[in-house]
Image (tube, rainbow, N blue to C red):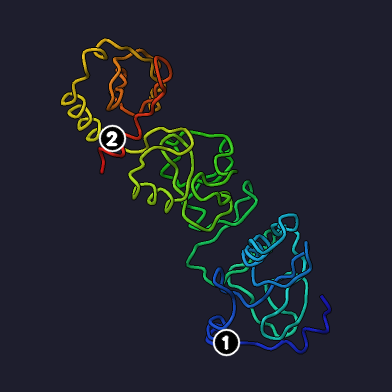
Amino acid sequence: MDSGSENHMLSHSSEDDEYRTEKYGCSHYRRRCKIIAPCCNEIFDCRHCHNDAKNSLDVDPLERHDIPRHEIKTVICSLCDTEQDVQKTCINCGVCFGKYYCSKCKFFDDDVSKNQYHCEKCGICRTGGAENFFHCDRCECCYSNSLKDSHICVERAMHHNCAICFEYLFDTTRGITVLPCGHTIHLECVKEMEHHFQYACPVCSKSYCDMTPIWERLDQEVASTPMPPMYQNKMVWILCNDCGETREVNYHIVAHKCLSCNSYNTRQTRGGQATCSSTNVSEIVR
């Protein structure tokens, strides 16, 4: 930085900064600078604004791309329009670009209520407070401390798209939940699944909540639906999505029960036309 530029820096009160905060930034972050994307040399409020614009349906599929966030080298002050190297305060007017600043991620945000922190192993900034999370080396992502001794490790658990909305999970700004099977998914996507009476992981098909009341209702449904004589001795092979057991059971039009764990979350694998009991589970829940 040119030392001479320090002579004409302007000082601002905290009240002035708060006022200026409301005027600048975008829907994603409150900040007082814009970034110059190193990939296309265009100006954006933040990386999400860039990615949304450059991955829209209006863009040629061959031209779509995400910004390499760690390669950002230049920002523009939103107050005085001075172009400069990435840093926390403007070299010209002295305004703070963001109360939270990460020199590694080239990230600014004035809303410190998010409790941002930089995870060295993830290589990105996360929210929620470093004291509330731990990094799982096998899953290669940060989880809540409440899962430290209870979660099932899935290699690179968040390094893939959400199975429902297909947004990349590792650096999403939306809430994520870890299912009992270890797979990750957006919390709002799980809620959307439940609105459609779907209670199994979309990746491995294991039930992610206590389905005992539903299985009991299916027991009653099966008992009240006797099969015709020609089918009473028919046997089929099933695979249980919950416990992984494979065994031969009596064929039934309603659903097939796993005799190992009492789950009806099963699929027929042999002995006639393949069926999946999860479809009938949805009907029972309704």
Q: Which residue is mark 1?
A: 13
Quarter of the rendering containing residue 63: bottom right
Residue 45: % across, % down: 65, 72
Locate residue 201 relative to residue 250 in the image: left or right.
right
**Which of the pair 111/130 is nearer the observer?**
111
Q: Quadrant of the N terminus?
A: bottom right
Report the residue at 45% width, 47% height from top.
Answer: 144
Query: In front: mark 2 or mark 1?
Result: 2
**Tag count:** 2
Element at badge 1? loop
Image-quadrant location for residue 38: bottom right
Horizontal placement of 246 versus 80: left or right? left
Indicate whether 209 appears above or below 46.
above
168, 16: nearer the viewer = 168
* Residue 195 left/right relative to 222: right
Give the crowd class for mark 2: few <14, some 14-19, many >=20 residues within 10 Å.
Answer: some
Q: Amino acid at mark 2?
A: Met
Query: Would you place residue 54 above or below residue 83 in this image?
Result: above
Q: Which mark is residue 157?
A: none
Disc 2 from disc 1: Cα separation: 57 Å
Residue 70 placed where, x, y %? 72, 58
Q: Nearer the viewer, residue 65 or 80?
A: 65
> Mark 2 sits on what residue?
211
Q: Secondary structure at mark 2?
A: loop
Q: Earlier in the sequence, mark 2 or mark 1?
A: 1
Left or right relative to 167: residue 208 = left
x, y percent for residue 78? 67, 81
Residue type (three-letter) at the residue carrying disc 1 = Ser
Q: Quadrant of the C terminus?
A: top left
| Rendered image quadrant of residue 238 | top left
